[in-house]
Image (cartoon, grey):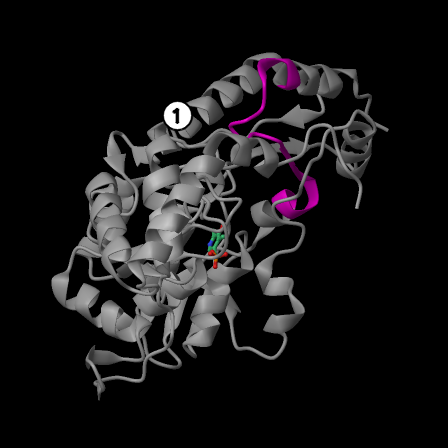
Amino acid sequence: MTTYQIPSNDFGRQWSEVGEEVLGAVRAVGQSGWYVLGKEVAAFEQELGARLGAPAVGCASGLDALEIALRALDVRPGDKVLTTPLSAFATTLAILRVGAVPVFVDVDQAGLVCLDAAEAALQQDRTIRFFIPVHLYGHALDLDRLERLVAQGVTVIEDMAQAIDAKWRGRPVGTVGRAAAVSFYPTKNLGALGDAGALLCGDPAVAARARQLRDYGQSAKYVHEVVGMNSRLDELHAAVLRRALLPRLSRWTTRRSEIAARYRAGIKHRELVIPAAGEGSESVWHLFPLLVGGAGRAHLAEHLAQCGVHTAVHYPKLISEQAALHSAPFSIVGTLAQAERFARQELSLPIHPYLTDAEVEAIIEAVGRWASP
Ligand SMILES: *Cc1c(COP(=O)(O)O)cnc(C)c1O
């Protein structure tokens, strides 16, 4: 593995800041003698829900949060679920795991699912009753439009794995859909020291079903109402998240926003486009995507690597083109031209909160020195 002076994530610097508090959280859990679904999980769910504006149910990962939400909202094998082909594979994997059929529509200028295309698909095919929009890259989708779809009877599950604390015109993501999925995978804006996730759900009956599903389908000890799974949240993760990490999330988000503003002011290159999010988005900048013209992406990535700057691609291949989909039923409505452009041209610059001002300037300069092939 190559090491870069400026990596995409810097867990070393994060540990120097949070390590002592993390160890304190570990000690508290160890001394409690209770390791799964206990007081720490309950306290974390309480704080997370209060902060994000909807009751939270902890689970083992973002993927599980999506699957549990689909099942709690009664998706059946063969049901069609509208979604985006440009996302982490988990968005579609959750749909496949419940035996449902993904229906892909194109993305917009920012790379997020195109709501015009989604509305058209829902109009055209009334048998599509479910929609998983993704607040990709840390940008918020238009929640007013999502709310209208909910009012029309579409079951919307927001994938906010990349967008914790993002808002649309002051309104937090995750509060409009029937449920929302959060991930605490280490690279996410609020990342645990391992896998963890949560779903948000304002409907007490659906939340209660989610609580059963995450724990073997139990409604009480040894009473199994439904065929559930093991997606329990560990006390360790809950304690570390609540005691050491969640208190820092606002500061981390502010730092990400400062870096994004600096990039947007400083990067002027005629071969590069910085995709703009919707006007109402108060983004949390999980990633900082660029679109590199022509065949320049690999060349720019190589140039930045020479300068010690790690970059990544989100995402190099559309989900609809992955081998795992060869044997799964799915459909595409319209073209995926814009999503294909992102797959060909997108390159993400480092934007983690531990970047120093000098590093940010060094990245801007390195981008400025690049000459396209
Ligand atoms: C990370 C991610 C997920 C899945 O979360 P895990 O915790 O890794 O299972 C789902 N959707 C999106 C958009 C993600 O970025």
* Residue 310 picture location, percent across and down: 71, 34
Q: Is mark 1 on a helix, strand or loop?
A: helix
Q: Determine whether, in the image, residue 21 is placed left or right of residue 3.
A: left
Identify the residue at horizontal 40%, vertical 53% (top origin): 237
Does the numbered disc 1 mark a residue whose Cβ is under 8 Å from ligand 1? no
Q: Determine whether, in the image, residue 216 is placed left or right of residue 289.
A: left
Amino acid type of the residue that numbered disc 1 sits on in the rendered structure: Arg
Segment colored magenta: 341-359
Tell me if residue 128 can be seen. no
Which quadrant would residue 300 be assigned to in this image? top right
**Quadrant of the frame with the C terminus:** top right
* Residue 44 picture location, percent across and down: 27, 49
Number of marks drawn: 1
Identify the residue at horizontal 37%, vertical 56% (top origin): 30
Q: Nearer the viewer, residue 186 or 183?
A: 186
Q: Nearer the viewer, residue 321 or 333?
A: 321
Q: Which residue lies furthest to the left in this view?
A: 204
Identify the residue at horizontal 47%, vertical 18% (top origin): 258
* Residue 366 picture location, percent across and down: 75, 19
* Residue 73 picture location, percent across and down: 25, 69
Identify the residue at horizontal 41%, vertical 29% (top origin): 253
Residue beneath disc 1? 251
Q: Residues within 10 Å of mark 1 (few under 14, many from 20)?
A: few
